[in-house]
Image (cartoon, rainbow, N blue to C red):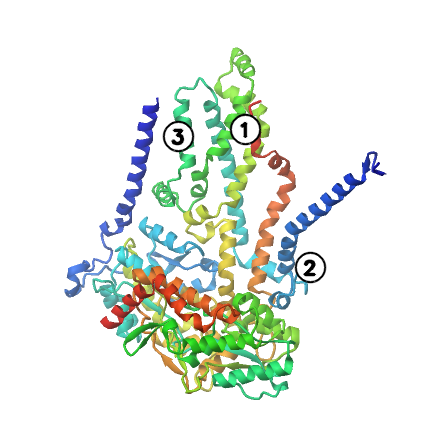
Amino acid sequence: MAKKVKSKGIAMDASEKFVTGFAYVLMTIFALIAILPCLHVASKSISGGTYVASGSVWFWPRGFQLETMEYILFETQFFQALKNSLIVTSVGTLISVIVSITTAYPLSKPSFKGRKVVTLLYVFSMVFFGGIVPAYMVVQMLGILDTYAAMILPFAIVQFNMFIIKNYFEGLPETVEESARIDGAGDFTVLTRIVIPMSTPVIATVTLLYAINYWNNYFHAMMYVQSTSMKTLQVYLYDLINSGSSFLENLASGGYTGEGVHTGLSVNITAEGITASAVTLSIIPIVLLYPLVQRFLIKGITIGSVKG
Amino acid sequence: MKKALALFLCLVMILSMAACGSKTTTETKPESKPEATQAPASGDKADEKPAANVPELKGPGNVTLKRLGYNTAFDPNDNIGADIIEQSTGYKVEYYMLPSENANEKLIMDISGGADYDAINISMNQFRQLVSQGALTPLDDLLDVYGQDILNSGHSPEVWDALRGDDGHIYAVPYMYPASHEIANFFTVRTDLTKAAGIEKMPTTIDEFYDMLVTLKNYYGDQYIICAGPFYQASEANEAWAVPKTITSAFGIYADWMVVDGKVIHMSEHENFPALLDFMAKLQSEGLIDPDWAVNNETTLKEKFSAGKVIVCAANRALGDYAVPALMENHGVTWDDLDYITALQGSDGTCKYMETTAFNFVTAIPKSSQNAADVVNWWNQRIRDELFITIGEEGVHFNYDDQGGIDPINPIFADERGSSYWYLDVTSAAYGSDLWPSRVRKSAGQWHAFSAVTMNPAPYIEFTTNEFKFKPATENFSTYNTTLFNDTMDFLKQVMAGTRTSADIERLHSDLVVAGLDDVRAELQAYYDAK
């Protein structure tokens, strides 16, 4: 008989203990795989330039300095890009959620005439994308190139998210709506007073999916923006990583003169350090936000897939 | 219902195709717009005398120009470089940047969509594409009236010819690569270590170079990486050579395509290519070069050098910016402990190194611009004030040294003229020889190497003209040449790794032929014969 061991209130036999221990080790390894690269980048962002240049920074800063961070924050467009990303994400998410709900609601009603055709149009455009050139031409002809609208309106509705809401709406009990209608409520009142309050889980999940979509959008934001002051954080970050090295080589006074005296840019500011600092700074908003919203993310996209 | 659905889908498909088809119409839209310049129409009328009725200047203060450039990390609108140009010319300018990735797609879409840029600073390939689409303004008449200083800035007729379209008109102004005789690849050597091993003099021949590595290996064993590389040169296309040109020079190989006795040959067909392979294989088999040579990149090489692990390191100027200062900080090395190996000679005295006469960028005016005259006037004023705009004021930003060279005063030079390179639209011929070296000189690390190998070039180096420096983009070359180059470099790395030998060269050739070698050669030969 297997030897019983005592845990906090629950006895575990040896095999259970082994499995539990193995799971802990495995999870720890996975956690380290996820966190060590982040730690490496964060360490480089605040390490001395000579240590960064010689590749001797691993998971702990060496030669602590904040000059690179200062440079990113005050000498580049970091704050402007952050502001743009926050505006696009907040306004875009609000618009998208409103548009998705108001689209999903009628489509969830079997009595809505032309429901199948309209649904088919959404499915078709979900499967077939017209391509970036026609999309660009539409944005350009609307006269919204280089504006926040160009980064929001083309993504005002993501069909997949809309269908998640629609499926959820279809699962709500019809009797509740009917009783409201008997009391004299119209469509708008039913939607805002009855349906939406009953659908907060799916709306929270879809809101999060939209927010992530807007926050991470790089390609279209890059294509539809012309002014440097309109770059979002992702575009800014990508450009900084790609162009930072050559920029520094041209700008730098080398950090040293023949006599070993520092001139111009600090030797602490290196291309690798700039990349690491920009990446570290840019993930801070997400890192701060994530603990607050992760439970919605875990509920995930399965929430609307099963009718209740 | 099914029939209705099928009909609907067909309709959608037809509409989609129609929408895609309309792209052509839109892309050619700029051609249908009235030309701002009122210059002679392109095509058959190119031989006619240029009309003098170019548009009148609106003048500084009456127009805001929009200038598009390549991507950079700083905001060009919020940089002192913009203020200096405005101070010098009086023109107010808004600056825009292409993205760092997908720049071509973005440029084509912007220009096709009629974006209202007045000047676009673009690569030669982008220029050729836009010229072929008829999206640019011919500049001949405008330059005659408003750009005399540009026309008289010392560029050869060959340069201007490269900026003409098929109709004979000039469509851009040149921003040339400034150092035609730069030794852009060399070896940086730690002489504190070589002297300890008894080596007093830097090698000048390939045999001396080999002897040096052997001496170092015998003295240090595996304590150091004797020789590490490659260090890629980023200034021109196809410069990611697996073997530094410092070495290939000794074998007479200076470019991927060369002309020998009037015939265009690929580097793999050069008579000394097998000898080059054998030499690199020998270095590898004897442990004289970094075993990671094939997988090294610029970052890993800089890390190895600045960590003090390498004695002889393949380099370009950029190594001096951060890797050398880091080496000094970490290991107490001084400038006196560094020396350089320039292009090496072969046993027969051969030392061929390619001239880097090329366009860095060119700047053109889209047809949609309504301010073409002011753009040319703006360029012209900047050429007149080139010294002040790009380098600064004597006594404030620089002093002249005894030889007449420009010696920058730091940190004000780096602070106030450090980013002026980004704003360059057109350079004079003298810019490269007189002004640009000071931009290298502002960095002690870059200047130490540059002055050693480029300012005082070894007398035996034979700078060889790249016959294809101004070749317009052609279909086969554009399609196949990158693959040909990469396949050849991969083969070199495989030889160095010991998985191939020079006996496999026939197989390389047959692979290259399949990859388009003969098609590219035919195009290059036709271009060379027509010159």
Q: Residue at x 49, y 56 (%)?
A: A239
Relative to B401, is B413 above or below? Answer: above
Position of residue B223 measured from the top left corner of the image (x, y, whole percent)? 65, 76
> Split into 4 quadrants, where in the image is the N terminus of chain B?
top left
Q: Residues within 10 Å of mark 1 (few under 14, many from 20)?
A: some
Q: Nearer the viewer, residue B522 or B458?
A: B522
- Can the viewer see residue B183? no
- Provide the residue designation for mark 1: A305
Amino acid at dot 3? Leu
Please name the residue shown 40% across and 35% down the image: A125
Characterize the local packing of mark 3: few (<14), some (14-19) or many (20 or more) Cα atoms within 10 angstroms: some
- Which label sits on residue A121? 3
CA distance separating discs 3 and 2: 54 Å
Q: Which mark is first along the chain, 1 or 2?
A: 2
Tell me, yes or no, whether the two marked residues, 2 and 1, touch with CB atoms within 8 Å.
no
Image-quadrant location for residue B312: bottom right
Q: Chain of mark 2?
A: A
The C terminus of chain B lies in quadrant: bottom left
Q: Report crowding for label 2: few under 14, some 14 to 19, many 20 or more residues within 10 A (C-alpha).
A: some
Q: Locate residue B106, reporting x and y percent.
A: 38, 52
Badge 1 marks a residue whose secondary structure is: loop
Instruction: Name the chain letter of the residue that bears numbered label 1.
Output: A
Q: Position of residue B6 (x, y in %)?
A: 33, 28
Whether labels 2 and 1 share one chain: yes
